């Protein structure tokens, strides 16, 4: 699970004080999101979830730009997806792509339990799912969120851009002025510095970098 506390400050006390201040001055998440995050925090792969602060940020960003159609690449158990659902409202639509049938099943069950009817989950390889979506797309997406297997990020970005060309004769994947967000792009700073000076490089660096990648048969 990603904690709200950040390591950017000089000591844990300052970090916790900033976290407390931020919590007191930020719009709270709806109860069904907070409850799902609390449950997800007890699961083995809890670190796959975004933090509550990240969920608050994504809701803010989507609402600021007036997003009504969102594509999420990497749904896991649906916490971030629920945030997007909250942001676009009942008249909006969220498409979530998830490789794992198990995780997708948990997400769908949670959506059903909370009467979230504006979310669609597609199970399978994300790149193939995106191509299939694009072939029948009637309206472009306003925002695309990438939070899946980290080694595929460049491929996801290239695919999104290739299907969003201004000269495309058909509907673009991402609308003009749309937004692409991606989680973990520096991956514990290993992208910028994978030398021994980065403690994560010494802690099974390759395993850490690929954490969250799913084996494909």
Image: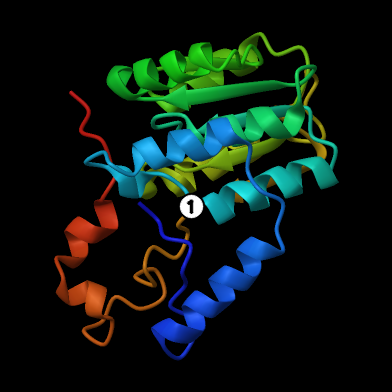
Q: Residue at x 53, y 50 (%)?
A: 52
Circle 1 is placed at which residue position?
A: 51
Nearer-the-camera pick, 60 or 163: 60
Q: Residue at x 81, y 32 (%)?
A: 167
* Position of residue 92 measured from the top left corner of the image (x, y, whole percent): 76, 21
* Position of residue 89 measured from the top left corner of the image (x, y, whole percent): 76, 25
Res 182 visible: no
* Position of residue 213 measured from the top left corner of the image (x, y, whole percent): 28, 42
Q: Residue at x 61, y 16 (%)?
A: 116
* Position of residue 111 measured from the top left corner of the image (x, y, whole percent): 52, 17
Colour mapping used in the image: rainbow
Q: Quadrant of residue 143?
A: top right
Q: Quadrant of residue 134?
A: top right
Circle 1 crowding by C-alpha within 10 Å: few under 14, some 14–19, many from 20: some
119 horizontally vs 36: left or right: right
Quadrant location, the C terminus: top left
Label 1 SS: loop
Q: Is residue 185 above or below residue 87?
A: below
Q: Residue at x 55, y 30 (%)?
A: 32
Q: How many marks?
A: 1
Q: Residue farthest to the bottom?
A: 10
Q: Is residue 86 above or below residue 60?
A: above
Res 196 visible: yes
């Amino acid at each position: 699970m990603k904690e709200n506390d950040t390591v950017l400050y000089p000591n844990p006390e300052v970090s916790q004080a900033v976290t407390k201040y931020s919590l007191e001055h930020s719009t709270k998440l709806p109860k069904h999101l907070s409850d799902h995050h609390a449950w997800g925090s007890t699961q083995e792969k809890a670190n796959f979830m975004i933090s509550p602060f990240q969920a608050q940020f994504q809701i803010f960003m989507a609402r600021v730009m007036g997003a009504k159609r969102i594509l999420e690449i990497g749904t896991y158990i649906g916490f971030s997806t629920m945030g997007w659902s909250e942001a676009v409202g009942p008249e909006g639509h969220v498409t979530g792509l998830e490789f794992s049938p198990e995780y997708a099943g948990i997400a769908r069950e949670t959506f059903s339990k909370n009467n979230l009817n504006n979310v669609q989950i597609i199970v399978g390889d994300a790149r193939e799912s995106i191509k299939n979506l694009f072939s029948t797309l009637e309206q472009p997406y306003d925002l695309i969120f990438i939070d899946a297997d980290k080694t595929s990020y460049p491929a996801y970005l290239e695919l999104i851009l290739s299907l969003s060309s201004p000269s495309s004769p058909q509907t673009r994947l991402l609308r003009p002025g749309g937004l692409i967000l991606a989680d973990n792009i520096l991956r514990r700073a290993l992208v910028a510095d994978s030398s021994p000076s980065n403690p994560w490089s010494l802690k099974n660096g390759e395993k850490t970098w690929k954490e969250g990648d799913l084996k494909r048969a």
